[in-house]
Image (tube, rainbow, N blue to C red):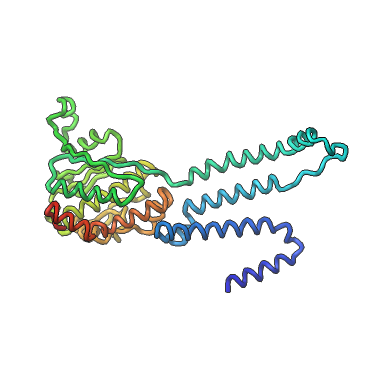
Amino acid sequence: MVSKLLEYFLEYLKGRAYWPLIQPVFALVALYVASCVIAYQYIEWRFHFAPELSTFIRSYIVKQITVVAIAVGLLAWVFGHSARSGPQADQGKWLPTIRRHAARNAKKLVLAAAVLALLIPIFRYLAPRPVSHIRICFLDQPDFDEGAFVYLVYELNRLQKRWYFEVDFDVFNPNTLSSDQRKSLEGDDKVVRVARMLANNQPLIGITSSGLGEDHFWINEGKLSVISTNEWNNYAPPSVYEFLAHSIIVQSILIHLNAHAGGLPQGAFRESRVSYNDLFQFTPRRFAMKAAIPAAHLSPAGEELLFNDFGAEYVKLCSDLLRLDWLHSQNVTGNLERIFKVKL
C-alpha cells in the first residue's frame, strides 16, 4: 500500500514542469532513507540488536549518514554545473585546454576541499569511542574462592573482543609500603585510598572483603571502582559469585563512561525511595540488590546512551552480560562445580 502511494506520488512529480529541478534532491533523499533502512537492518543482522526506532533515529549512525548525505549534496552542487566549451580556435591545442579547465575548476576544487575538511572531522567525531581494558586487583584477602572468581573473569573476556579484564593475582600487602605511603593511607576510607594508589589514574576495579560504610556494595570514582563482598552472605542468594559478576559488569560500564564519554548521565545514582531497576539508578534499600541482580537490564535511555557512545556491539554485549545467562550456562556451572567445587 505504501509503495503504491509512493509510486503514484513519484509519477505525479515526474509530470510537473519543476521535476528536473527537484529530481536531484529527490534522488538524494531517497538514497538517504534507503541508507538508514539498510543500516538498521545491518545492525539487527550483525549484532542481533534491534534498537527502538526513536533510539535509532537519534543514534550516531543516522547522524553519520546525515553528514555523508550533506557532503554528497554539497559536492554535487559544487561540481554540478558543467563548464562551457572554450573558443573554437583552441580546438586541437590540448595544453591550453588543460590550463583553461584547471583555472575554471580551481574554485570548485577549493570549495570541495573545504566541504570535506569540515565534514570529515564531524563524521569521525560522531563515531563510537574505543574503550580501555580494566585491571582487577584484590585489596585484601578475598572471602571467596579466588580461583573460581578468576575463571569467571576469563569467561567474560572470552565473550567479547573489544576490551578485557586484566587480573592482578598479587593481593595488596601493606608491608611492602614505605612509612610515608602507610601514613597517606590513614583514615576512614583506607580501602578507597589503597585503590586510588594502585590505580595510578588508570581504569581499575578493586575487590575487598572490608565494608564501605553507607555505600556498602560499591564505590565509583571516575576510572576507579571498589566492590565490597562484606556481609554478602547475609543477602545470599544470589551467591557471592553472581554478585561479583554483576558488579564488575556494572562497574566496567561506569568506568568506560567516565573515562571515554564525559561521565555518567545526569541524575545517575541520585538518592531516591523508588526504583525500577535501571542500571544508573540508586538502590534505595540494601535488600533490593537481591532482586536487582537477576533482573538486571538496560533501560531504553541506557541503551541509547551506550549505543551513541560506544556502538551497537558494545550495547548488545552489555545487555547480554547483565542477564547473566552466560554465568548460568551448563558449561560454566559445570566447570565451577568440577574444578572449584563451587555451586552458584
Residue 304 at least partly seen:
yes
Q: Quadrant of the C terminus?
A: bottom left
Question: In the rendered image of this protein, does residue 186 appear above or below residue 10?
Answer: above
- Nearest to the observer: residue 80 or residue 270: 80
Question: In the rendered image of this protein, does residue 62 appear above or below residue 219?
Answer: below
Q: Picture coordinates of residue 281 (x, y %)?
A: 30, 54
Residue ranking furthest to the bottom: 1
Q: Quadrant of the N terminus?
A: bottom right
Q: Determine the residue positioned at 82% across, 35% down.
A: 93
Q: Picture coordinates of residue 268 (x, y %)?
A: 33, 50
Instruction: Name the quadrant containing residue 22.
Output: bottom right
Tally of numbered tags? 0
Q: Determine the residue positioned at 21% across, 40% down.
A: 137
Q: Determine the residue positioned at 51% across, 51% down.
A: 63
Q: Picture coordinates of residue 42 (x, y %)?
A: 47, 58
Residue 250 at least partly seen:
no
Whether residue 85 sits left or right of residue 10 in the image: it is: right
Instruction: Name the quadrant containing residue 319.
Output: bottom left
Residue ranking furthest to the right: 89
- Nearest to the observer: residue 341 or residue 304: 341
Whether residue 259 sits left or right of residue 148 in the image: it is: right
- Nearest to the observer: residue 199 or residue 109: 109
